[in-house]
Image: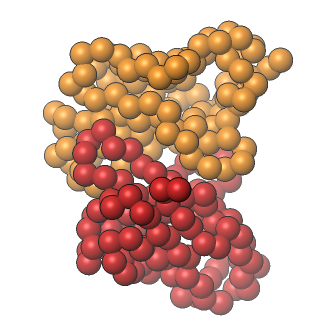
Amino acid sequence: NAGVTQTPKFQVLKTGQSMTLQCAQDMNHNSMYWYRQDPGMGLRLIYYSASEGTTDKGEVPNGYNVSRLNKREFSLRLESAAPSQTSVYFCASSGDRLDYGYTFGSGTRLTVV
Amino acid sequence: AQKITQTQPGMFVQEKEAVTLDCTYDTSDPSYGLFWYKQPSSGEMIFLIYQGSYDQQNATEGRYSLNFQKARKSANLVISASQLGDSAMYFCAMRGVRDNFNKFYFGSGTKLNVKP
């Protein structure tokens, strides 16, 4: 099925541990995004990539790094996890037409203890 | 810069009644798109409806319609004949052609509860 695939779906980390969230899309979209959503709140953009080989900071980039490995894959890395990074993380992709909305992955629920 | 405002943190509606979720936006971009997403308690984000700034007619998708008032910069979502399964968070979003086309701007969301 076409779409955006995120792994893992759930993760518990200890403070200071590192991990990489993986995201892949098979819709040939140029743009990919990472968002975080805290309980009862909206979506905040962490990083995005408008095309293969480019990445840009969003609203809340501190504590994160990203890699646009190829057109399909966009990973998010937490180098030293902190409890404040406990959140649900969504990857999304979008095509280049104005009427193309986001296609979202199913989300990763991350808890940092 | 673009901004999306959803002023209703939470709303209740009786099953089978219609409900309007408000969304206002601020942009200087002459061409833009407006989107609504639904997030049920299971967490996934579901695309509902799209409205282009130059579209002459309001968008409709099944029980969803978008009441687009360009001069007022509002793009309210209307759900007709509410169902229990409509209980969810709803987010309004936009993207502009000129102002960083690759970024979507989201509102803070409205939590809708449908009462039986």
Find residue B19 and report its image quarter: top right
Determine which quarter of the picture holds residue B95.
Answer: top left
Residue B109 appears in the picture as rendered: no
Measuring 66% from the left and 50% from the top, which residue is drawn there?
A: B43
Left or right of A47 in this view: B11? right
Q: Position of residue B78 (x, y in %)?
A: 52, 18
- As drawn, the chain in red is A
| Picture coordinates of residue A51, whole percent (x, y) | 26, 68
In the image, is residue B80 above or below residue A79?
above
Q: Residue furthest right?
A: B116
Can you give x and y, in whole percent of width and height, for residue A74 in the image?
42, 73
Q: In this view of the protein, which residue sits in the foreground, B31 or A57?
A: B31
Residue at the outermost front position: A1
Give whichever of B85, A63 is nearer the camera: B85
In the image, what residue occupies the spot 76% across and 25% down?
B84
| Chain letter for the part of the structure drawn in orange | B
A80 is higher (above) or lower (below) than B14: below
Q: In this rendering, does residue B93 appear at all?
A: yes
Would residue A73 be found to the left or right of residue A53 on screen? right
Please say if A11 is above or below A92: below
Total number of numbered labels? 0
Relative side of B49 to B51, left or right: right
How is colour applied across the structure in the image? by chain
Q: Residue at x 75, y 15 (%)?
A: B15
Kindly identify the residue that appears in the image at 63 percent across and 37 percent down. Answer: B89
Placement of the C terminus of chain A among the 4 image quadrants: bottom right
Residue B49 or B3: which is nearer the viewer? Answer: B49
Q: Percent x, y for residue B53? A: 25, 27
